[in-house]
Amino acid sequence: MSRVYNFSAGPAVLPEEVLKEVAEEMMDYQGTGMSVMEMSHRSADFQKIIDEAEQDLRDLMKIPDNYKVLFLQGGASQQFAAIPMNLMKNKVADYIVTGQWAKKAYQEAQKYGKVNKIASSEDKTFSYIPDCSDLSISPDADYVYICENNTIYGTKFKKLPNTKGKTLVADVSSCFLSEPVDVSKYGIIYGGVQKNIGPAGMVISIIREDLITDDVLEGTPTMLKFKTQADAGSLYNTPNCYCIYVCGKVFKWLKKMGGLEEMQRRNIEKAKILYDFLDQSKLFKGTVVPEDRSLMNVPFVTGDKDMDAKFVKEAKEAGLVNLKGHRTVGGMRASIYNAMPKEGVEALVAFMKKFEEENA
């Protein structure tokens, strides 16, 4: 069976080049006579893997020296609790709710202090990003929280909110490494890696050093203290070694491809092919206001549930898989992350045109 075009939102498509390299090293990683899966996380060989992965990520994102890079388990969802536990000194935080994951983070934070929802787009099924240029930021807020790209709803902050001097915390799970970013604008920028970077099971959190202290909420588990993880260089306990290894390969692939500027150029080009088709289609329509569209996740509908189901089924038969939309939006969703080749998007649009002609 040949490989399909996989439009899954995560776990998602990985670069073929990386998969082949990983396969070649499966039984014997660079002359060690064993797989990275079997390697001690305390070994010199693994230390080199994690050090290189961190350095390559620092290079790609131009991460300032006063930020720590942590490779953590528990996915982005565990950070929904870890963030308030570590940052809520005044027990106040402001959240901007633009989708399911921001909402879950907002709900989780309420266990630890007073959490204000200072903006939301829930009134229109999260189909836009609210104006965040002049929000009523709480004077004693410990931080302002956003989910920068909303995987389910296909929206993206094109401009960061004006936090009026407060620390910005951003979940970038589904736009991680898709474009250049100014890390210094964030206190914490973090994301699950299973969408745009590597296999499932890990989150990378990039944290400004002044936010890493022993002054955390009482009862914070040892493992969820940023300081525990930072002091141990992400090796306090056995980390997700294999995931770190594959992510490291992806970082090298990104550098070889030309870095984040080149990725942004490609991602704009790929997304335009799909959005241009949606904008002129008589059958399909996008669900997001044009100015807030994500380059990574593109939801669209026909307006007829049966037609949507027929499309998803026939697309799968044509080798275009995982196009079913999230249950809260319905319809379809194409996730077109860094590793999705332009040919995949072109194949999808060609299939959509054919489907439209046959079902008009």
Image (cartoon, rainbow, N blue to C red):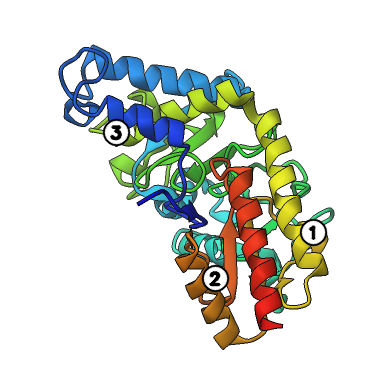
In the picture of the structure, the residue carrying the numbered disc 3 is: 242
Q: Is 182 placed above or below 311 here? A: above
How packed mark 3 is, by other alpha carbons closer than 10 Å (few <14, some 14-19, many 20 or more), is: many
Q: Residue at x 71, y 57 (%)?
A: 274
- SS under mark 3: helix
Disc number lying in front (3 or 1): 1
How packed mark 2 is, by other alpha carbons closer than 10 Å (few <14, some 14-19, many 20 or more), is: many
Q: Front-most of 278 and 197?
A: 278
Three-letter residue code for mark 3:
Tyr
In the picture of the structure, the residue carrying the numbered disc 1 is: 276
In the picture of the structure, the residue carrying the numbered disc 2 is: 325
Do residues under tags 3 and 1 come within 8 Å of each other at their CB atoms?
no
Quadrant (top left/top right/bottom left/bottom right) for the C terminus: bottom right
Upstream in sequence: badge 2 or badge 3? 3
- The answer to whether residue 96 shows anywhere in this view is no
Give the alpha-carbon distance from disc 2 to disc 1, as whole Å.
20 Å
